Image (cartoon, grey):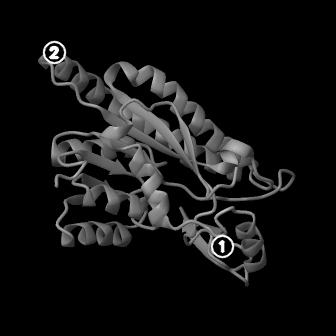
Amino acid sequence: MSRKLEGKVAIVSGSGRGIGREIALKLASEGARVVINDLDAAPAEQTVADIAAAGGQAVACVGSVTEAGFADRFVQTALNTYGGLDIIVNNAGYTWDNVIQKMTDEQWEAMLAVHLTAPFRILRAASNFIREAAKKEAEAGTPVFRKVVNISSVSGVYGNAGQANYAAAKAGINGLTKGMAKEWGRYKVNVNSVAFGLIMTRLTEAAADGDAKIDIAGQQIKVGVNPQILKSAEATIPLGRAGTPEEAAGAVYLFCIPESNFVSGQVLVCGGGKP
């Protein structure tokens, strides 16, 4: 039985760990050749090695999606290595929460930079290839559907206290999604968003002591959720639990396969039934 993404080329930002890693593994398992990205070389190379060990193809593009010039380098890695680009998944990101009276300009701007400006730059960097490829394919009578999946959040759909910056950025990516669906429809590009609810990753795992942190460009960002708050949050989910990274990847996969060729400009909530 043929794999649904055989011969396709995908770039997945933030795919060395967590949800991004599972997205990359899923796409590779269905035949896609994947460009892996992470802030750090070790997790990116590990994901590449795991894909290779399973019989797939992948290459790493290490660096921050917010760095000047990264978007061009990311897209060019796919073109130089695999000769094309069919799937773009804008996944990289993190949260930096605070109530608005305590939120700094740095916190606000950091969330807009990673969740909204970086995806915009990546799509802009891919635009020349997409337009030229679509034109050639149309002239040859061999149209190809391409896919963009932007990762949003229920915070961007419904809002969330303490996340004015993150909610605004994720609402913005939904707006970018809908705008690009209209702009790139002529090139047979489906552009959609997946808004995640509570998914268990290193950013949301139980952290009783409150000392769990990740390093983002030298800034120590607190991660993790108080176990009691986590338990309460799970109790409000109709399915009774948080989602897994594999389940989150499955929602993204739905927008990458041929069966979704007539679905564009949509925001799919992947939240276990919680609105």
| Kind of residue indicated by mark 1 | Gly
Label 1: element kind: loop
First in residue order: circle 2 vs circle 1: 2
Residue 38 seen from this side: no
Residue 113 is left or right of residue 62, and the answer is right
Residue 28 is left or right of residue 255, and the answer is left
Eye-nearest disc, 2 or 1: 2
- The label shown at residue 164 is none
| Residue at the left extreme of this rendering | 140
| Residue at the top extreme of this rendering | 139
Q: Position of residue 171 (x, y in %)?
A: 65, 39
Q: How many marks?
A: 2
The residue lying toward the viewer, choosing from 257 and 174, is: 257
Q: Position of residue 42 (x, y in %)?
A: 35, 72
Q: Position of residue 266 (x, y in %)?
A: 53, 35
The residue lying toward the viewer, choosing from 173 and 158, is: 158
Mark 2 is surrounded, within 10 Å at the Cα level, by few (under 14), some (14 to 19) or many (20 or more) other residues, namely few
The residue lying toward the viewer, choosing from 178 and 99, is: 178
Q: Residue 23 occupies which quadrant of the picture?
A: bottom left
Label 2: element kind: helix
Residue where numbered disc 1 is placed:
224
Residue where numbered disc 2 is placed:
139
Quadrant where the N terminus is found in the figure = bottom left
